[in-house]
């Protein structure tokens, strides 16, 4: 079976992301529509039967286009939200730089949390637990699924699959907006498809914002 990880479309890059409630930008809406068209055209190959999504607006809004195209309901999963960046969520970048100079994801220590948010350690443990429970659930069903989520979440899942160490200090793999990334369950474990097999992946790399 296959689980397709899908990053949300482009949102407002003038604000800090994380738990921001900002919706898709016009470009992001167009990206979501193009992706839904692609998925609909290749539905017999992708065979997506269930759709799950982070409940943050930018992810859920991206998922909506695909759910309408495939006539499938969306199961919202708050546990797959991006990093909880607390008071910075949705804050204008220029204001955040003035009020919290130097406060960036890569600057945090492993157990140092954003003000009213979570630490890299807490984020990692949250996604690890969520992925383990999610994997168990979808493997029981045995149906191909799509999970709409965020770049940070996808990078944690990558480390869980690869058996590598996750660190906010390391440069993470760029995850393009609306990338459609297949994870295949073969011989008792999840594995990433090669880059050339990423259906509909937009090749332009985007920097992670938290």
Image (cartoon, rainbow, N blue to C red):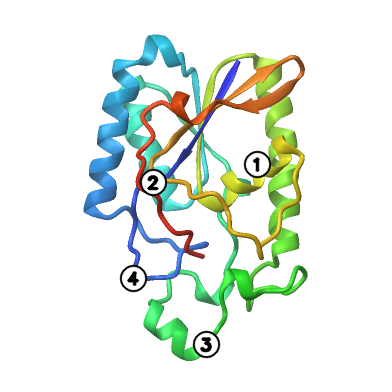
How far across and how far down the image is residue 174, in percent?
Answer: 49, 50
Identify the mark nearer the N-term, 1 or 3: 3
Q: Which residue is mark 4?
A: 14
Location of residue 143 with respect to 113 vertically, above or below: above
Please give the name of the residue rendered at 44% of the width and 16% of the height, measured from the top-left corner. 46
In the image, is 182 to the left or to the right of 122? left
Label annotation for residue 176: none
Decide: few, some or many residues near mark 1? Use Cα within 10 Å; few <14, some 14-19, many ≥20. Answer: many
Decide: few, some or many residues near mark 2? Use Cα within 10 Å; few <14, some 14-19, many ≥20. Answer: many
* Distance Cα–Cα, label 1 vs label 4: 27 Å
Identify the mark nearer the N-term, 2 or 1: 1
How far across and how far down the image is residue 209, in percent?
Answer: 47, 63
Q: Which residue is mark 1?
A: 157
Whether pointer 1 and pointer 4 mark residues with C-beta atoms closer than 8 Å, the reply is: no
* Distance Cα–Cα, label 1 vs label 3: 30 Å
Q: Which residue is mark 3?
A: 101
Q: Which residue is mark 2?
A: 177
């Amino acid at each position: 079976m296959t689980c397709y990880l899908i990053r949300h479309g482009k949102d407002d890059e003038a604000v800090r992301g994380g738990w921001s409630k900002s919706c898709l930008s016009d470009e992001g809406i167009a990206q979501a529509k193009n992706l839904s068209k692609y998925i609909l055209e290749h539905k017999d190959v992708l065979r997506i039967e269930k759709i799950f999504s982070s409940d943050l607006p930018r992810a859920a809004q991206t998922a909506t286009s695909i759910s309408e195209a495939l006539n499938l309901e969306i199961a919202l999963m708050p546990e797959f939200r991006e990093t909880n960046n607390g008071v910075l969520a949705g804050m204008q970048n220029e204001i955040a730089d003035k009020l919290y100079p130097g406060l960036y994801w890569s600057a945090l220590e492993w157990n140092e949390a954003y003000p009213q948010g979570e630490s890299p350690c807490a984020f990692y443990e949250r996604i690890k637990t969520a992925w383990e429970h999610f994997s168990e659930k979808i493997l029981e069903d045995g149906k191909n699924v799509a999970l709409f989520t965020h770049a940070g979440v996808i990078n944690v899942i990558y480390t869980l699959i690869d058996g590598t160490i996750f660190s906010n200090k390391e440069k993470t793999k760029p995850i393009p907006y609306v990338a459609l990334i297949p994870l295949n369950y073969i011989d008792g474990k999840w594995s990433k498809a090669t880059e050339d097999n990423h259906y509909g992946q937009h090749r332009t790399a985007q920097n992670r914002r938290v």
